[in-house]
Image (cartoon, rainbow, N blue to C red):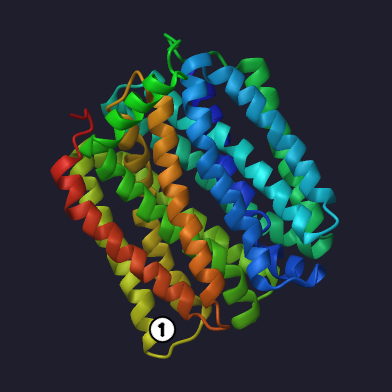
């Protein structure tokens, strides 16, 4: 495949995650009131999706090592389109949660394969730069999703926002079917044998480089998820913004992330992965701490949250390419399994944070603020300790 086509496919597959979560965020309050369901149930449409997303990767990963990336992508994207249509037509909150769970499981095939494809095609040293290009594309999709979701919800309804996901999934499915070429050079016929699978997982879990970068990507995604899961309620219901204004704030959030991915490529070329991550750790801690201190001082405004969040997202744009590619880099023969475990750990952080938010959202900005602050401390500590000690991009 031509390099431009590879980056486009990576961008679309990685972009499944933000468009599936971000596009309907502006509609969450309306969705909750439309079904006369509590806020915790509305948030379950996001938490259940992410739990299924994380768990499914443990199955998709070994399957893709055994049969290749292409058949897994075709199956996963077909299921994603069908689940998107089911979500659009759901007559109750319970059925919506079920269809979103199926959608999350299908999404796992696309995102997991994208991370594995990077390891299939690139050396470890090139992997972080290639991943940052794909994640720049993800950032563009993330930029457009909340404003588009807000506009569709205001003009039509949350159902139209969910129908847009079916269209996006169909575009991805068509591109994979027509243009994607298999990237696994040698399939592993024993990848699904229980003994081989257990041996592969133990090998990955014993690798300190995997844990260093998985801790980084997991904590960084935990911080982002905290903001995503609570921001629509905070900005729309607590601070009184319209859905469209909220969508524009989310646009600025994603734009900062795109700038971070470009900074990632610039920094890696000059300083290497470890020093780039250390610099990003300083950005992350500055953003999270500023958000927390402004809230503690009694300042309640959208920009008291958004300006620190933008600094946090600049760091996030560096941590994610380095973390996701670094976790998979030591395992060229088991990239699917390593990508799956890395994705599973990221989603576990998000799932447990979603449960905490569901219990602690109290009609104030504090759960969002304290959550982001907590993760920013964890991210910076990981960046300055584990990654510095074990963050050899070639592995051990």
Figure quadrant of residue 96:
bottom right
Q: Quadrant of residue 104?
A: top right
Name the spot of residue 2 as percent of width and height, x first.
50, 16
Q: Is residue 262 above or below residue 284?
A: above
Front in this rendered view, residue 193 or 152: 193
Q: Nearer the viewer, residue 91 or 381?
A: 91
Q: Residue at x 64, y 30 (%)?
A: 76
Regarding residue 115, the answer to whether it shows in the image is yes
Residue 52 percent location from the top left of the image: 58, 45
Q: Residue at x 75, y 65 (%)?
A: 31
The location of residue 311, given as percent across then percent down, is 37, 63
Quadrant where the C terminus sits is: top left
Dot 1: few (<14), some (14–19), or many (≥20) neighbours within 10 Å?
A: some
Q: What residue sits right under mark 1 in the picture?
A: 295
Quarter location, residue 262? top left
Q: How many marks?
A: 1
Horizontal placement of 331 versus 3: left or right? left
Q: Tag 1, which secondary structure? A: helix
């Amino acid at each position: 495949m031509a390099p431009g086509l590879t980056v486009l496919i990576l961008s679309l597959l990685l972009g499944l995650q933000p468009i599936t979560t971000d596009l309907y965020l502006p509609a969450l309050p309306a969705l909750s009131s439309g079904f006369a369901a509590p806020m915790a149930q509305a948030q379950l449409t996001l938490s259940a999706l992410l739990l299924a997303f994380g768990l499914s990767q443990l199955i998709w990963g070994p399957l893709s090592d055994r049969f290749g990336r292409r058949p897994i992508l075709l199956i996963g994207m077909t299921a994603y389109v069908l689940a998107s249509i089911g979500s659009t037509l759901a007559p109750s909150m319970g059925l919506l949660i079920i269809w979103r769970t199926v959608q999350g499981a299908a999404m796992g095939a696309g995102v997991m394969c994208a991370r594995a494809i990077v390891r299939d095609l690139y050396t470890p040293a090139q992997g972080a730069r290639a991943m940052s290009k794909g994640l720049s594309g993800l950032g563009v999709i993330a930029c457009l999703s909340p404003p588009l979701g807000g506009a569709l919800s205001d003009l039509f309804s949350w159902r139209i926002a969910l129908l847009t996901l079916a269209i996006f999934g169909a575009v991805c499915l068509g591109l994979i079917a027509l243009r994607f070429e298999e990237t696994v050079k040698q399939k592993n016929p024993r990848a699904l044998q229980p003994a081989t699978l257990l041996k592969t997982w133990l090998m990955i879990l014993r690798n300190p480089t995997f844990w260093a970068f998985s801790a980084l990507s997991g904590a960084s995604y935990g911080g982002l998820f905290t903001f995503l899961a609570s921001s629509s309620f905070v900005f729309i219901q607590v601070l009184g913004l319209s859905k469209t204004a909220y969508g524009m704030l989310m646009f600025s959030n994603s734009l900062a992330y795109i700038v971070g991915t470009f900074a990632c490529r610039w920094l890696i070329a000059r300083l290497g992965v470890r020093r780039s991550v250390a610099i990003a750790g300083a950005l992350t801690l500055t953003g999270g701490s500023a958000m927390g201190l402004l809230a503690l001082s009694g300042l309640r405004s959208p920009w008291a949250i958004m300006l620190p969040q933008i600094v946090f997202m600049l760091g996030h744009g560096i941590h994610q390419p380095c973390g996701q590619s670094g976790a998979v880099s030591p395992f060229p023969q088991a990239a699917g399994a390593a990508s799956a475990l890395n994705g599973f750990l990221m989603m576990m952080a998000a799932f447990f944070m979603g449960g905490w938010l569901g219990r602690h959202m109290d009609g104030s900005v504090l759960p969002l603020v304290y959550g982001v602050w907590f993760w920013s401390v964890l991210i910076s500590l990981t960046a300055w300790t584990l990654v510095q000690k074990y963050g050899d991009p070639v592995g051990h």
